[in-house]
Image (cartoon, rainbow, N blue to C red):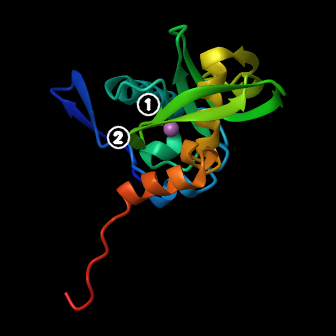
Amino acid sequence: MRIPQRIDQCGANRYFIGMKVVKLGDPILRQKAIPLPEVTDETRALIREMFETMEKEDGVGLAAPQIGLGIRLFVVKADDGVERAFINPQIIETSTETSVYEEGCLSVPKNYEDVVRPARVVVQALNERGRRFTLEADGFLARVIQHENDHLDGILFIDRIAPDKRARIEAKFATTPVPEGR
Ligand code: NI
């Protein structure tokens, strides 16, 4: 796990270092994340940093495993511009109607593929205040929520495309094995 480190400079400006988005090949992206036992000030600070990291990387969603934390938390800022944090989320309903959209992922940079998903979802989660909410989403928001929720179960969008396409992308991220005897 990588815990964000903080550096206080002159006691005034706070800089954050160490929140780095992990890439395909990092085992944490394939692990099932665990629920957060409680929502604290630390959780809220983490959420704030996740939004900042997401914006810096031009993302629309970021899940905790992507920054090396195996907890069930993700943040989303979709086309409506609303910042939403989802803690211990559960997708409780999905539409039978599906939609196709070209997805990318900060952990699989520069690769984009069409992914089929339910067009609408109902999700329940805790917000950054620790309050339970239910959200019915469609369009782009529903898409981002499903993509980020997948991250909490170790699932990436490349798992939802044709196996040959997936293999091509995985090969690009495979680390070169060190030859024996060196
Ligand atoms: Ni992603």
Q: Nearer the viewer, residue 121 or 17?
A: 121
Residue at 23% over, 32% down: 8
The answer to whether the residue labelled 2 contacts the one labelled 1, judged by CB atoms less than 8 Å apart, is: yes
Residue at 39% over, 49% down: 23
Q: Can you give x and y, in whole percent of width and height, for residue 10 in the image?
A: 15, 26
Task: Locate the N terminus by quadrant.
Answer: bottom left
Local secondary structure at mark 2: loop
Q: Nearer the viewer, residue 175 or 150?
A: 175
Residue at 39% over, 51% down: 2
**Left or right of residue 86: residue 63:** left
Q: Can you give x and y, in whole percent of width and height, for residue 4 in the image?
A: 36, 42
Q: Amino acid at mark 2?
A: Met
Residue 132 appears in which quarter of the rendering? top right
Is the CB–ligand 1 distance for label 1 below 8 Å? no
Q: Nearer the viewer, residue 24 or 116?
A: 116
**Numbered badge on residue 50:** 1
Distance between mark 2 and mark 1 Cα atoms: 8 Å
Q: In the rendered view, tell whether residue 85 sits above or below residue 154.
A: above
